[in-house]
Image (cartoon, helix red, strand yellow):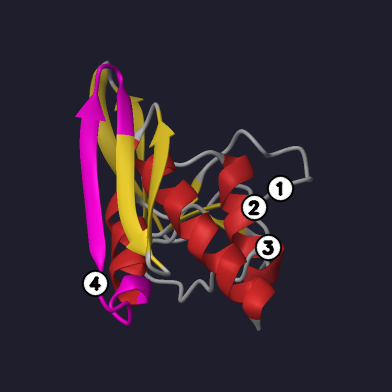
Amino acid sequence: MITLELAKQLQAAGLVWEAGVNDFFAIPDRGMDERLFVVADMLASLDVFRGWPVVTFHGTAEWSLDYILTMEVVWMPREDQLRGQLVDLLQDEPDPRLQLALHADRYRCTIQYSGAGHVFEAADASDAYGLALLHILQRRFSHE
């Protein structure tokens, strides 16, 4: 999972979230920066009942926000979602390339964009994809 800081940068660079079930998001600047939320069509939680681990299902949560606007939250895209965004943005390139490789203990994402090769490294594959996506979004935004 990408860092909250990188997710905020992607959002500021113009990454649009079309929310769906199983998407993760954070609610920043409300004392919940360390919490991660998931969009679900039914609330389920882990509990212990008579000494046994169980999954419980609830129609409503004990505490909850009534609602929150999607513009108030930060999408935390998964690795597959980041890769999908990159593929979509690179498809218009004359020679699109996207590669992810593990070198030592770091992931290296290599892209071909605007006629040049670019390399982005991070400890996590999601962050490497996220950095590449951020680069493309920032370049597109600065050229518009």
Mark 4 or mark 3: name the one nearer the start of the chain: 3
In-front residue for pair 69/67: 69
The residue carrying mark 4 is 95
Q: Secondary structure at mark 3?
A: helix
Image quadrant assignment for residue 68: bottom right
- Identify the residue at horizontal 37%, vertical 49% (top origin): 129
Mark 2: amino acid: Lys
The residue carrying mark 3 is 12
Mark pair 1, 4: CA separation: 38 Å
Tell me, yes or no, whether the two marked residues, 2 and 1, touch with CB atoms within 8 Å.
yes
Mark 2 or mark 1: name the one nearer the start of the chain: 2
Question: Where in the figure is residue 76, as x and y percent of width and height?
Answer: 49, 52
Tell me, yes or no, whether the two marked residues, 2 and 3, touch with CB atoms within 8 Å.
yes
Q: Nearer the viewer, mark 2 or mark 1?
A: 2
Mark pair 2, 1: CA separation: 9 Å
Image quadrant assignment for residue 30: top right
Q: Is residue 16 magenta?
A: no
- Identify the residue at horizontal 64%, vertical 78% (top origin): 143
The residue carrying mark 2 is 8
Q: Nearer the viewer, mark 4 or mark 3?
A: 4
The residue carrying mark 1 is 28
